[in-house]
Image (tube, helix red, strand yellow):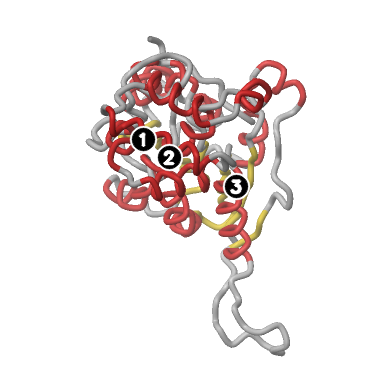
Amino acid sequence: MEFKHKSVLLKETIEYLNIKPDGIYVDGTLGGGGHAYEVCKRLSTKGRFIGIDQDEDAIKAAVRRLSEFEDKTRIIRSNYCIMQDVLAAIGIYKIDGMILDLGVSSYQLDDPKRGFTYREDAPLDMRMDQRQSFTAKELVNTYSEMELYRVIRDYGEDKFAKNIAKHITAARKEREIETTGELTEIIKGAIPAKVRMNGGHPAKRTFQAIRIELNRELEVLEESLEDMIELLNPGGRLCVITFHSLEDRIVKNIFKKSEQPCTCPSDFPVCVCGKKSLGRVVTRKPLIPSEEELGYNSRSKSAKLRVFERT
């Protein structure tokens, strides 16, 4: 199956990245290389681009996509959470810009073998990095009812989280839950019929929640953003595209804290905490897809772009 993915907010991201032709740029979630291609096009022979992704299929697709720029690109299979170490290993300690596109690629969603989709029956997997041994199947069959409830409530924001967790734990007492189809049927049974009729696919929120928990998506983001800002040269920009309200909140809060880190009480005449601003938030409100983009890429619907500039 060919790796296909439409890059979301592509024009806006490239514009806000403010690319210098001789600069060093990083994409921490390379995917199929859509954003990367547009960055590389704008770099001179002195410019450098580093693409990082933990998904082997994405790496292979990006190598093909960026083949015409191979003299200025470096593609590395890793997780963006250890980006500082990855870059230091190739002699890079400061960069001029970075992109993080936190969406799951269309390829991952559409390839049944990857076990992300609730639309086809396939083994429960959902690993972004297939070198990881723990899968969605293990999660669904080993988490306690309370843990499942927490995951589905917090990451799926599903009002039937308690009932879904109860149905999952009851079903697995009969036999192990092995496939996406089995899990989907269990979830359907936990949601009232009239809600199922009107509220989109009943399994969507639970599948999203399990994927986020399994791949530690929110922890990785929260632990990494400040390190990424530290990597930027003055004037360098970090562009982050989120698809989930919790992701967006993390980005918004860390950007705000990086701009105004002072912890002194508001009535202090001067700052005594010594915490210095790392830069400024470029986007006071997140950028969202245009009507035109929504028309040709419905999966961009929940995307939000926030941008931070280092000073």
In depth, the one of 197 and 291 nearer the eye is: 197
What residue type is disc 3 on? Answer: Asp
Residue 75 in view of the camera? no
Secondary structure at numbered mark 3: helix
What residue did someone put label 1 on? 170
The picture places residue 152, in percent across and down from the top left corner, at: 48, 42
The picture places residue 68, in percent across and down from the top left corner, at: 42, 18
Check if mark 1's residue and mark 2's residue have beta carbons within 8 Å. yes
What residue is at 59 percent from the left and 58 percent from the top? Answer: 255
Q: Which mark is residue 83?
A: none
The picture places residue 247, in percent across and down from the top left corner, at: 55, 46
Q: Tell me how far mark 3 sits from mark 2, CA to CA.
A: 29 Å
In depth, the one of 260 and 47 nearer the eye is: 260
What residue did someone put label 2 on? 166
Residue 146 in view of the camera? yes
What residue did someone put label 3 on? 248
Q: Is residue 141 above or below residue 150?
A: above
